[in-house]
Amino acid sequence: MLEKYNIPSIQDADLNGKVVLVRVDHNVVKKGEIHDPYRIDATIGTLYHINAKGGKIILMTHVGRPRDKKTGEIKISKDTSVEPIVEYLRNKLHVNMKVPDFYPHENRGYLGIETSINHLIRELQEGKIDGIYLPNTRWFQGEEAEGSDKDRFANQLAGLADIFVNDAFGSWQPHASTVGVNKYLPSYAGFLMQKEIENLERIYNPQLPFIAVVAGSKFDTKIDSLYALIKKADYLVLGGVIYNAYLSAKYGLDIKGISEDDMKHAKKFVEFSKQYPGKLVELPFIIESDTLEGRQKGKYRVHNIHELKPGTKLNYILDIAKESFKEEKITKIFSSARTIFVNAVMGFTPHFNEGTIALDELIDKNYEAVKLYGGGDTMQELKRLLPGLYIVALDSPKYYIFTGGGAVLKAIQEGTTLGIEPVKALTK
């Protein structure tokens, strides 16, 4: 598959005795804790391979959003530290891995890689330690910078190693650590990156019928991929706030909590979808809640969208009712599918869960279909709500869980894996 895109793979690299800088997507820490190590575990095959071939590993990832976009200030704190990841790897792999200690400048994070790291690299080369894990890449000024600052940081990172391996499919933003380092070092795709690209092909060239299910809290973050999917898929199913905005735009409902921006996008999408009659599958039963404070008795109710008149005022629509997934038309569409792509949490978490549970259970009843789940919240909610199904999905050839939902949507939107800048950078 990589040959099609002219992407060099880690299998082709001479790793013996080389220091290998590996960009991973271990962005799994929230407030100093790991909630699901799936993204870490997914990269272990690459780490084993490098070690087995005699390579010396330096890892790097981003964690959270420590940089204030308005002020540019970078906050270094335990909440966005890599230490929980390092501790997890130490315990799982029984390795001695160290994190270098750099000097933080007030509100500016780290200015760059400091020479103090050299003694750790010596220990790594001499076999005294098993690996180095750099601090959160977003703690460095150059990571999210542009121009010369970005290039300078990328060059500093490259100076640490002999070879660069990108195994961070989910980290699709074109930052210094994902698109800059390859300018200065021989660069290769890791095993996870290869696996994600292979599974993307199952979306680009799906077995038909192909259903896509997409939900989200903002239309503008999903809109371009929705345009691409309604053209490509046999059926498109919406959920979350984007479905609320769609219903408001199409049926003239006045639903609380929808922004003007979302309504603007929704109206355009409703018009656009008329070119593809029958493709947009509407889930008829929705749950209205008087409050965002949870599923409180007497303060929520189920509506059939086809019984609501234009101008009807509704409070917050916080879930799809399970009755929607029992409708004959809906069950028939899902049972006949041969490829199902899901990037969706249907309800307002953590209290409104019945839509997500009903969706995932209905999908699982289709034994023939390939089921491709986008990462992030979709994966977290599958694990939280249906842990047994989640465990099955991890090992089933009929399931694949991507490590990065945003990256998949970006690739769908662009129509090619090379539309993701860090993947494209590996071809240069």
Image (spheres, helix red, strand yellow):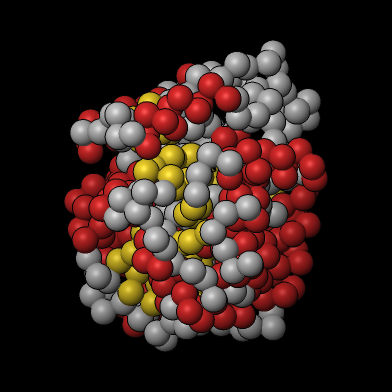
Residue sitting at 37 percent across and 37 percent down? 125
Q: Which quadrant of the view contains residue 147? A: top right
Instruction: Indicate left or right for 249 with 406 as reference.
Output: right
Residue 353 point in image, percent of width and height: 38, 45
From where the camera sits, is residue 340 visible?
A: yes
**How many numbered discs?**
0
The residue nearer to you, when weighing 425 against 125, is 125
Q: Is residue 405 above or below residue 284?
A: above
Quarter of the figure that contains the C terminus? bottom right
Where is residue 132, by image quadrant? top left
Q: Position of residue 3 (x, y in %)?
A: 48, 79
Give the position of the N terminus as an image quadrant: bottom left
Residue 82 appears left or right of 279: left
Which residue is rendered at x = 52% and y = 71% of the image?
7
Place of residue 391 in the rendered image (x, y in percent of width and height, measured from the top left): 21, 53
Percent x, y of residue 286: 49, 54
Q: Looking at the image, is 39 positioned above or below residue 80?
A: below
Q: Quadrant of residue 223?
A: bottom right
Whether residue 251 appears in this view of the structure is no
Viewer-proximal residue among 20 and 357: 20
